Image (tube, helix red, strand yellow):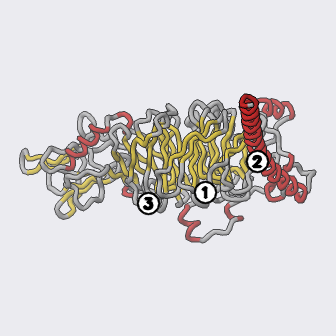
Amino acid sequence: VTASATPLPVFPARHEGRGFSLSVRKGAAVSLVVEAEGSSVLPAFIQGPVRFASVWSPFAGTLFMASVLEDPALQRQFRGHKNAITSIHFSPNNKQLATSSLDTFLMIWNFKPQSRALRFVGHTDGVTSTQFSPSGHLVASASQDKTVRLWLPTTNGEMTVLKAHTAAVRSVNFSSDGQCLATASNDKSIKVWTVHRQHFLFSLSQHTNWVRCARFSPDGRLIASSSDDKTVKIWDVTNKLCINTFTDHEGFANFVDFDTTGTCVASASSDNTVKLWDIRMNKLLQHYQVHSGGVNCLSFHPSNYYLITASNDGTVKVLDLLEGRLLYTLHGHKGPVLSVAFSRGGERFASGGKDAQILVWKTNFDKFNSSEIFKKHLKRLHPGAPPHLNDIHPRSPHLHTAELHSIEINPRLEVTDTQTTDPCFLDIVSSSSSSPQSKTTCRWNDIPAHQDERRRMDFQHCPVSPSPPLSPLRRKQKETYVPLPASLGEHGSIPPVVSDTLEHIVEQLDILTQTVSILERRLSLTEDKLKECLENQQEMTFQFMQAE
């Protein structure tokens, strides 16, 4: 057995029945061919991704290794959340990863080795969505506690609360210029806010069921929304009108997003399908039914050539949009996969699932033409052709079938990585929050959990000392850099009863605003009708006078 270096070193292979097996050191790039009984070239297969592969050949012979670079590989794994991961988003500089979970926490992970993760405490119910601002200076989170919160992604823990929704908030999204924020809620509405002043601007309310997702177009002029009413709607932000509705889904529309050009939207549905529309022609472009369970999330590659999807069937799939076919099927999560996202440059993508773990993958396929990838993969699977040496199709019972569905990648087949440990984390409690619960740093031990689940999470918490308070001058500079005034209900001088009353007043004002808007429209219609009646009366009077 040889590795892809010159000169080629030879590694001993272990005989197992009819074949040989070999465990390769982490980091070695591997692929192989088999020579048996002279010059005959026979197929062999690599079991597992390149990062750590076990090699097995059904024939006796000499194994040679080369490199497999076109396939995505598992790069990092983060564990620390206590419940399902609901949302994932990369920072603009690709150095951090924000995740939200039903455990009520927002966490920010650092890709730098040995760096602590930050866990933000403040929400009182599950966190359903999170996103970095385009500048990376803010992080927004939405929660089932009916609030949206804006955080500074630092150890200072400064935060402001936005309240207007009357039910759980399912989605949060910044406009591309970072000036506006769109939120979607179970109250069947989409609300738009200003980020600088944290003011509510307007609501969009034509969905007839829960709104699961709302996304700005790249130019900020449109909003796409998906709902449990099985529709995807396109909204004009300037006129605050719905300009198009797509009704092709037979199940709930779980997620929607624009491509980077803003001319195409893709939606994921509980009917196991992914659909892409051209919003200029209002035409369905592509339809994929590659999952065996509901599709929860999707993300466009920055090139718009690829789309990744997350599903209840426990897989992440990579779709080639140019060829219109499934390219890769990625395994690794134990249970439904709820969220997936590409980094801004597309060099990484991450997935999060109900198993409370985050998997970060390295994107290699975007450097190769998908047709070439499939051609090479067919060569290494088809018995009549010479193998390509790059097989990662681990557990198929019929490796030589001519029908090709997708390239399977399963990191569970790798040798366990015992060198990289889960990062420690630091609890961040908002400096503007003064409730007794928020002033006490929350630990995992404070939250009841099943012992087996705690052991499976392999959680490690490193105690840390709190950060020293900022001087008044530095705090003033910080607030000037990213102004985040605390909401009125968070000051310690206001009793909880008054805070709840103010929240109720805000909810009633929102309803009153919508009612006034409806009355204004009806008044306009009445005025138009009255004007039409007066014109008809004048015309009839004129005709009568002429007749006389």
Q: Nearer the viewer, residue 320 or 289?
A: 289
The nearer-to-camera label among 3 and 1 is: 3
Q: CA distance from mark 1 to mark 2?
A: 38 Å
Question: In the image, 111: left or right of 530?
Answer: left
Three-letter code for the amino acid on which mark 2 is drawn:
Gln
Question: In the image, 262: left or right of 168?
Answer: left
Where does the image place residue 232, in percent across and percent down from the top left?
Answer: 54, 47
The nearer-to-camera label among 1 and 2 is: 2
Q: Which residue is mark 3?
A: 293
The C terminus lies in quadrant: top right
Is 241 situated above or below 273?
A: above
Three-letter code for the amino acid on which mark 1 is drawn:
His
Question: In the image, 274: left or right of 492?
Answer: left
Three-letter code for the amino acid on which mark 3 is drawn:
Gly
Does residue 504 show up? Answer: yes
Residue depicted at 48% across the width and 34% down the height: 280
Secondary structure beneath dot 1 equals: loop
Q: Nearer the viewer, residue 335 or 229?
A: 229
